[in-house]
Amino acid sequence: MRKRIYLDYAATTPVDPAVLVAMRPYFNRDFGNPSSLHSFGQKAKSALEGSRNVIAGLIGAKSEEIIFTSSATESNNLALKGVAFANRDKGNHIIISAIEHDCVLNTALWLSKQGFEITQIPVGKDGLVDPERIEKSIKKDTILVSVIWGNNEIGTLQPIVEIGRICRKKNVLFHTDAAQAFGKIPIDVVRDNVDLLTASSHKIYGPKGAAFLFVKRGILLTPILHGGGQERNLRSSTENIGSIVGFAIAAEIADERMNSENKKLLMMRDKIINKILRKVPDSYLNGHPTKRISNIANLRFAFVEGESMIMELSAAGIAVSTGSACSSPKLEPSHVLLALGLRPEEIHGSVRISLGRWTTDKEIDYLIEVLPRVVEKLRKISPFAR
Amino acid sequence: MYSEDVIKHFRNPHNMGKIKKPDGIGKVGNIICGDVMWLYIKVGKSASRRKKDEEVIIDVKFETFGCTAAIATSSMITDLAKGKTFEEALKINKQEITESLGGLPPIKVHCSVLASDALVEAIYDYLAKNKRPISKELEERHVHIKREKEIIEERYKEWVGKQEEVVGEK
Ligand code: FES
């Protein structure tokens, strides 16, 4: 079979075999509904609470502060809408960064149509939010600040602790979307001054369909889903027990291997960045060179377009992604790259390479060999290249 | 999502590159996503018996900055235009290009418009340069395409400038 190399781990990850084994019984043997009082239900219930304890322990939270949801998108929706509607009497101003994931950005846009005022904090050329700008934007009626911890496109890690400190001082709730950061950097919600935090299972070798929102005790949220009152009445729905169990195991594994995996991925990531930038003229790194997640490199090549790069790479068996307008369903360039001050034509040539648990040196070497060739080939077709 | 023919043309585009002293150049941009296509034509007398002595496009080449579909449609239009009279060439539209490629995803149809626009512009350029009569219809198409191009050029100024600098040094 033709070689297939997956370098799109920031999009989603395969489920770790150990996770798959651990979650399997909950689909047919211990399949009960955790709300049922009989033994089937109670077995599932104890697995659910066990998973909650594990996850809470990993981020320094209390078990009852973890709300399981179906996706990071749902968690982010619940955080923003939940805080917004529960605090309407206190104020209607919400602050987000300009490089939030679509699900935070579009939730904020929707809230702006419901009468909330949204401020977007710009980022620097390196993709970092300046905490001082957040401090200056906080007003009397600000109820929430939400900043993505690790950016999904360029991988930059924001100064979350500092932003949290400012929010605490100003008495404003602070939410962070840690979908890319959870499992890859140590998180302690108490030390890091976080009030609400989103994390997702399928980014850390768990199954899709499970995520959580950490909600610090005492914070009131208006639920989005109404029904049987599961998850402290904040998220009605029969719990997706198999996926939740898998999520907790995946989180445990990620935590255990965090240091060794980061070390490996960082070396591979920097090797890619250094070699490619050296080999390919007019190529650049998007985002801060060091303040970034260990597994994401976002590179930019002048004079060529990303969708065609993806297709050429895919023909060579390599799977990566791009922020080019041509590949987006709305034909719009990535708002994250726009926020870095890049022009649409520069964004056209951007490629995100994201590594993971099963990435090998051989795969990296193959990428380093193929990618420059692809750029060269497309530059021969481009009117702009020399 | 792409047909086999699209991928074939994309991976091995036909007639790619520049023509040294072209008789006409069509430079177009796509205001939807910002892609650019340059098309060069060489005009001459037809060698075929059927069109004996008629003026036809004897050679055509392209350069494209754009997606898979943009490159594939560029390649396809060069195939379609070769050997055609102006009248025939101006009739090549997005339907014909798309069908010849075994279809395009709906969101990519605009890329094929870029290709037919480039051909229109190359022919217009040739006719205008040689002070030849230009039909009202062609004039209108040219004005419309030019307006879009101006918007794109504003965006790409820096790169186009760079390129011309390099050309100038040689
Ligand atoms: S050239 Fe941008 S979508 Fe085809």
Image (cartoon, helix red, strand yellow):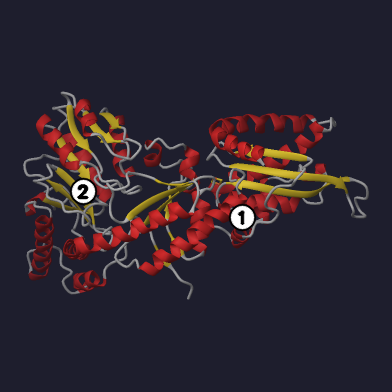
For disc 1, the chain is B
Res. A368 mark: none
Residue A219 at x, y = what percent?
10, 40
Q: Position of residue A145 (x, y in %)?
A: 20, 35
User: How many callouts does the rendering have?
Assistant: 2
* Amino acid type for the residue under numbered disc 2: Thr
Q: Residue tagged by mark 2?
A: A198
A288 up-or-down from A9: above or below: above
> In the picture shown, does residue A202 fall above or below A303?
below
Distance from disc 2 to disc 1, alpha carbons, whole Å, reads 42 Å
Residue at the spot x=22%, y=28% of the render? A93
* Left/right of residue A316 with respect to residue A156 in the rendered view: right
Name the amino acid, label 1: Gly
Residue B17 in view in this figure:
yes
Quadrant for residue A368, please give it. Answer: bottom left
Vertical placement of residue A297 versus B127, above or below:
below
Q: Nearer the viewer, mark 2 or mark 1?
A: 2
Q: Secondary structure at mark 2?
A: strand
> What residue is disc 1 on?
B103
SS for dot 1: loop
Q: Is mark 2 within 8 Å of ligand 1?
A: no
Q: Where's the C terminus of chain A, which quadrant? A: top right
In the picture provided, is B3 more to the left or to the right than A290?
A: right
Measuring 88% from the left and 50% from the top, which residue is drawn there? B46
Q: Chain of mark 2?
A: A
